[in-house]
Image: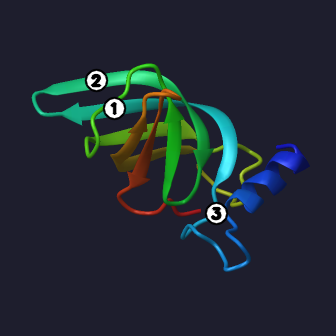
Amino acid sequence: MKPFTAMRSMLANWVGGRGYRRQTVRYDCNIPVEVHLDSPGHLSIFTAVACNISAGGMLIKCPTLPDSLTPCHVSFTVPDWFPFPRADRDAVAYANVRHTNPMHSTFGVAFSSPLTF
């Protein structure tokens, strides 16, 4: 990751000198992910791109947007530049869709349990 991008990620989490707005720091990225949406009576699997990631969730860019609160799981490879080393770079995170943004073709997921590194 370029130093400017890392700094921008850290600054995006800071709000008016009061501290972190989020529980975990998020990092801008551009990594491929595979999303499995578990809609009632239907399983959708598609590839997308993660725009940012944290231990608590990620923002995913995809032309097809799921409904909010849809359970899913996301498969991805943890990037080498990610600040927390992992012995196993392949990760599967169980999550729920928390919000969608049709204007930017993105949706945010909250992991059921934080990623451990």
Q: Classify the position of the N terminus by image quarter.
A: top right
Q: Residues within 10 Å of mark 1 (few under 14, many from 20)?
A: some
Q: Amino acid at mark 1?
A: His
- SS under mark 1: strand
| Residue where numbered disc 3 is placed | 25
- Label 2 and label 1: CA atoms lie apart by 6 Å
At x 27% / y 35%, what residue is drawn? Answer: 67
Q: Nearer the viewer, residue 94 or 18?
A: 18
* Mark 2 in CB contact with mark 3 (< 8 angstroms): no
Q: Secondary structure at mark 2?
A: strand
Q: Pick the residue in front: 49 or 87.
A: 49
Front in this rendered view, residue 15 or 31:
15
Q: Position of residue 84 (x, y in %)?
A: 69, 61
Q: Which residue is mark 2?
A: 44
The image shows residue 14 at horizontal and vertical percentages of 70, 67
Q: Which residue is mark 1?
A: 36
Q: CA distance from mark 1 to mark 3?
A: 25 Å
Q: Is residue 10 left or right of residue 68?
A: right
Badge nearest the viewer, 1 or 3: 3
Q: Residues within 10 Å of mark 3 (few under 14, many from 20)?
A: some
Q: Secondary structure at mark 3?
A: loop
